[in-house]
Every structure is written in structure tokens, then in C-alpha cells.
Amino acid sequence: MSEKTITRADIVDSLVQQVGLTRQDSSDYLERVLEMICEELVADNPVKLARFGNFVVRRKNARIGRNPKTGTEAPITARRVVTFKPSPLMRSRVEASLATKEK
């Protein structure tokens, strides 16, 4: 199994090759899309990308946690976290590719 992580540079290179944009334009477009997603999440708005998935901000309440190494209790403050739920199409594509790799 490959351990390669896709990077922004990989996405920019793909846009240059497949769409024909310049490297600078590709980088600018990618950066703007990511900024738009972040702006919406900061404003507590969900981001829904058809056939990809949903990003949602969840609020977690304050609670008491425990250090697993020492067993000492420590307070965990309330916070907001971003969650991602893949679309059924994405889920099925990933499962299908996993099944073909196992053969």
C-alpha cells in the first residue's frame, strides 16, 4: 500500500496538467476555494460538496478527561471541532478501490 500523502502542490500540478491553467492561477484558485471553506466553517455554516461530503462544525462541551499514562484527571475546555462525513458516492468509490486492491 502506498503511503503517499497528496499535497497542495500535487493538486496544483494536476490542475496545470488536466485543465491547462498556469501554475500561479491554479495555486490562486485552490487557495481561494480553501479560504471559502474555512470562512464558512468559522461562521458556523456547514459546507456541502456534492458527491464528496459535508464539513460541519460541532460544539463539544467542557468535561473532565483523564491522562491515559498517569491516570490524572484534567479539565478539557469547551471547543468547536470540524467533522467530515463523506458522501455515499465517495464511500462506495473508496470501498470499491479497496476491494480491487485486496484481489
Image (cartoon, grey):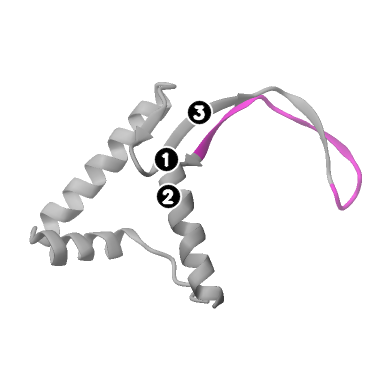
**Looking at this view, is 51 or 85 the one in front?**
51
Could you tell me the amino acid type at mark 1? Gly
Seen at 39% across and 21% down, the residue is 43
Q: Is residue 70 magenta?
A: yes
The answer to whether 66 appears left or right of 99 in the picture is right
The answer to whether 63 appears left or right of 78 in the picture is right
Q: Quadrant of the C terminus?
A: bottom right
Q: Which residue is mark 2?
A: 90
The percent coordinates of residue 94 (x first, y second) are 47, 58
Could you tell me the amino acid type at mark 3? Val
Could you tell me the amino acid type at mark 2? Met
Q: In the rendered view, tell whether residue 76 sits above or below residue 3.
A: above
> Regarding mark 2 in the picture, which secondary structure is present there?
helix
Task: Check disc 2: other Cα within 10 Å, few if <14, some if 14-19, many if 20+.
Answer: some
Which residue range is magenta in the image?
Answer: 68-84
Disc on res. 8: none
Seen at 48% across and 30% down, the residue is 56
